[in-house]
Amino acid sequence: MADHGTPLSAHDNNTNSHIASSTTAGTASSRSVKRPRPVKSCIECRSRKLKCDRLLPCSQCQKSSRGCRYATDGDANNLSEGSDADTPERPSKKTNLTTTHDGATKFRDQTVSAAPSLLEEYGVRLDRLEKVVLSSMNARSPVTAKDYSHRAPPLASTSVTIRGLTVKGGLRTRFFGQNSTRVLLNLFDEAKDFMFRKDKPLEVRDIFTNIQKIHKGLQEEQTKALAPISVYVDSITSVHKRMVDVLPKRAVCDRLLHVFLSGSESLYRTVHVPTYMNQYEHWWDGTLQSESFLPQLLSMLCIGYRFYGAEKGLGPDRESIHIPTACSLVKEWLNTLRGKQLMDFGTLQAEVLVVMAQRMINPNNQDSWTQLGSILRMAMTMGLHRDPSEFPQKISPFWGEIRRRLWYTILELDLQMCIQCNMPACVREGDYTCQPPRNIDDCELTIDMRELPEPKPIDQRTDAQIQVFAASTLPVRFKVIDIVNKLNTLTDYQAVIDCGNALERIFEDMRYILQRRQPRNQEEATRLWLTKTTLDMHLRRAQVALYRPFALSTPDVPQEILTCYLRSSVVMMTYMDDLDATCPNYTQIFHLHHLVLKQDILQAAFSVCYYIKHVPASEEERMSPYPYSHTPGVRPDSFAEACLIATESSILLSRSRLISVTEQALDAMTSRIREIGTDLKDLVSLTVVLSLCQGGPPDTAYQRVVAGLHKIVDAGIQSMHTSQNDIAARPIMQSSPITMNSLSNAQGFMNPVQQFLISPEISNMIPDDFTMWDMEFWNPLLQSGS
C-alpha cells in the first residue's frame, strides 16, 4: 500500500507510468477484501472538519439546524482519501501543472460556494431563534394578561398616602412611613384644606392660636422632664459609683423589679428569672462580682416604674428612680466598654434593656430602629444567629437556651420597629439558624444541666409560652415586611391575600390557646387580658401594615382586604373594652395600654375615619359637606360600595359604632394630653378629620370641628393647671421669616417654596429633630388671610 503515498521518480516516463497504473489497477481488482474503513461522515461535517457521529441527522447538524446529507454511491463526495477502491489514477509528471491549476480553480470555486452556504446557515439559525422566542411569548401570554388585569395601579400615583419625606435645604431629610400622622392626613383633603387655608374663620384661628400656646408650654415642660439630673451625669466620679447613687432603696427596688418581671418578661425574654434573682440577692449582700448587673437592674426599674402610671419616673423623686438620669448613666457605662467587654452576654442584655427603658419616656421609633440594628449586628458578631447546637462542646444547654430567648427577643423588637417605621428588617428568614426557645418554665433550667427537658405542648402555659408562640409566627411577619417594602414589584394581590390568610390562621391558633385558660379570680383575669392583648397587638400590627397600602390607597382592592383592615383597626381601638373598669389596676393598665399602643390607635382612628368618609349616613350627604373643599373628585362608586359592604359585614362595624369608637379613642388620647409622647398636632388633625368625615350640612360640620378643638383647649388648660386668661396672655411665638424647602403640595401641607414664620429658639424647646414638623404645622394654622 506504499504506492498510494509514494511519488513517482523523476526518471519515470509515460510508458512506465502506464504500466505501473495498469499493474496497480489489476492488483486492486484481483483483491476481494478491501482495507476496513469506518462509515463516512456527512457532507456538512466533512466540509467543516467536524467530528460526526454518522447518524441521520447527526448531532452537529442538529445543533446548528443544518440539513444533514450523505453522499450517494458513485458521487464524487463519497470518495474518501486513502480508500483502496476510491484511489484515482495518478497523474503523470507532464500533467502536473495542469492538475495544479485545475485544483486551484476548484478550491476557489468551493470557497465562493461556501459563502452562500454560511449565510444560509445563519438564516436558518435566526429563523429557529425567532420561532423559539415567539413560542415562549405565546405560552406566557395568558398569565401575562391575567397579571395585568389584576395589577394594582402604579403606586407612584398614590405614594403620598403611603410614605413621605421632609427636606430642608437639600441636606437634611427624614423619611416617614405609612402610619405617620403627616402621611395619614393626606387621605383627607377637606381636613387639610380646613386647617391650612389662610381665609379660615377668625374663631377657628383664635382656637388654633391657643392650642399652639398650650403645645409650646407642654413641650417646654416635657423638655425639662426628659433632662437628666446634671449632678449625676456631669460628675467626675466613676459611672458605676453614680449608678449606685441613683439606685432607690431595697423596698422600692423589690416592688419595681416585681412589676417588670411580671409585666415584661413574657414576650421579651431577657434574663433567666431564678438566676437573676439569685444575683439580685448577692448584690444587696455585697458579694456579687458582675459589671453588667447594675446597668441591667437600673433599666428594669425604669421600665417597672413607668408601668405604674403617667408621669412616673420623670420627676426628681428621691424615694424612687429618675428614668432620664438612670438611662443616661447606663448609656454612659456602655460607651466606656472596649474590646472583649463588648462581646459579653451581660453587655448585650444591658443594651436591649436600656432601649426598652428609653422607649418608656421617648418612644421615637426611628431612633429605636437605628439602635436595634446596631444591637442585632452585635448579637450576630457574638454568634447568636447560629443555633447553639452547632457548638455543643463550647455552649452548655442552659446558656444555649438563654441565648435563643435573647436572640428572638431582639428579632421581635427589630420587627416591631420595622413595622412602625415602614423600614426593611436587618435580617430575614433564612439568615439565621437559631431555633425558637422551648416551651418550658424557668425553674426547669439549671446551669449544670446536661440536656434540656422536653418541651411542653404549646397550649400548656409556661414562662416561655408567649415568646415561643410569637417566635413560630416570625416567618409570616417577615414576609409582611418584605411585601410592604416591595410594593412596586407586586403584579397582583395573591401574595398579599396568602400572607393575610396565614395571619388569620395564626389568630385562630392564638384564640384556641388562650381560651383554654379559665381565670379563677380578678387578678388572673387581668393577667390573662394582658397576655392576650400583648400577643394580639404584636401580631395584628403585621396584618394592619400588610393591608394598609391597599385598603386606603388603591381603588380596585379586593373586598376581603377592605373588610379585614377595617375589622383590625376597630380591634386596635377596643382592647380596653374587654377589661373590667372596676379592677384595682385599671388606671395603671389604661396608662400602659396607651403608652404602648399610642401610634397604633392613632393610625386605626384615621383609617376608620376614611371608611366613615366613604359611607355617608344618607344619599343626600354623599357630596362633600365643606363648601371650600379643593378635592378634584371623589372615589369611584365601586370603592364607596366596597366600603359600605365592609361596614355591613358585621353589626360591630356599623357606621354609628365606628364614629362612637373613634370618638372614645380621641377622648382617651385627649385625657392624656400632658403625657410624654402625646402630640397636640395628632389630636388637632384627628379632631378635624373626624368632625368633617361624618358629613351633614356645612354648618353642622363646622360646629363639630369647633367643639372638638375646644375640648383640646380645655384639656390643655386643666393639665397645665392654668386658666383661659393665662393662656390668652401668653405671647405668641416670636417669628422671623426663614425660607425652607418643604414637602411638595401632594405630600405636605404647603407649597414647595413657602415662607414660614418661626422662632429662632424653637429648636431648644423641642426634644427631638421634629422641629420642621412643628413649623410646617403650626405656622400655616396661624396665618390670616391677606
Image (cartoon, grey):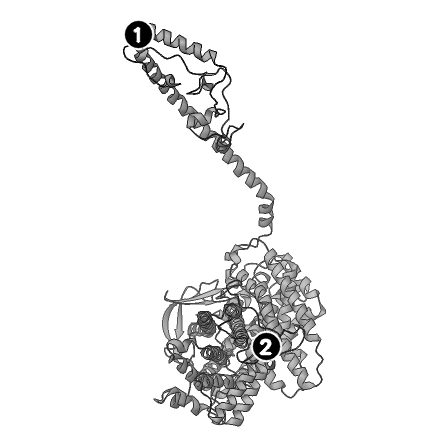
Vertically, is 478 above or below 406?
Answer: above
Vertically, is 422 above or below 245?
Answer: above
Q: Quadrant of residue 451?
A: bottom right
Q: Are marks 1 and 2 in contact (CB under 8 Å)?
A: no
The outermost residue toward the left is: 11
Whether residue 21 is visible, yes or no, is: yes
Which element carries disc 2, helix, strand or loop? helix
Vertically, is 745 above or below 726?
Answer: above
- Number of callouts in the render? 2
> Circle 1: is it few (<14), some (14-19), or many (20+) Cα within 10 Å?
few
Q: Nearer the viewer, residue 78 or 487?
A: 78
Image position, residue 593 (x, y; %) = 59, 79
Quarter of the C terminus within the rendering = bottom left
On screen, residue 746 versus residue 557, left or right, reads: left
Mark 1 residue type: Asn
* Identity of the residue drawn at 61% across and 86% down: 587
> Circle 2: is it few (<14), some (14-19), or many (20+) Cα within 10 Å?
many
Residue identifier under label 1: 13
Which element carries disc 1, helix, strand or loop? loop
Image position, residue 511 (x, y; %) = 68, 72
The CA span between labels 1 and 2 is 124 Å
**Of marks 1 and 2, the one in the foreground:** 1
Per the rendering, the mark at residue 492 is none
Q: Quadrant of residue 226?
A: bottom left
Image position, residue 384 (x, y; %) = 49, 71
Image position, residue 410 (x, y; %) = 51, 73
Mark 2 residue type: Leu
The outermost residue toward the top is: 15
Residue identifier under label 2: 666
Whether residue 749 is visible, yes or no, is: no
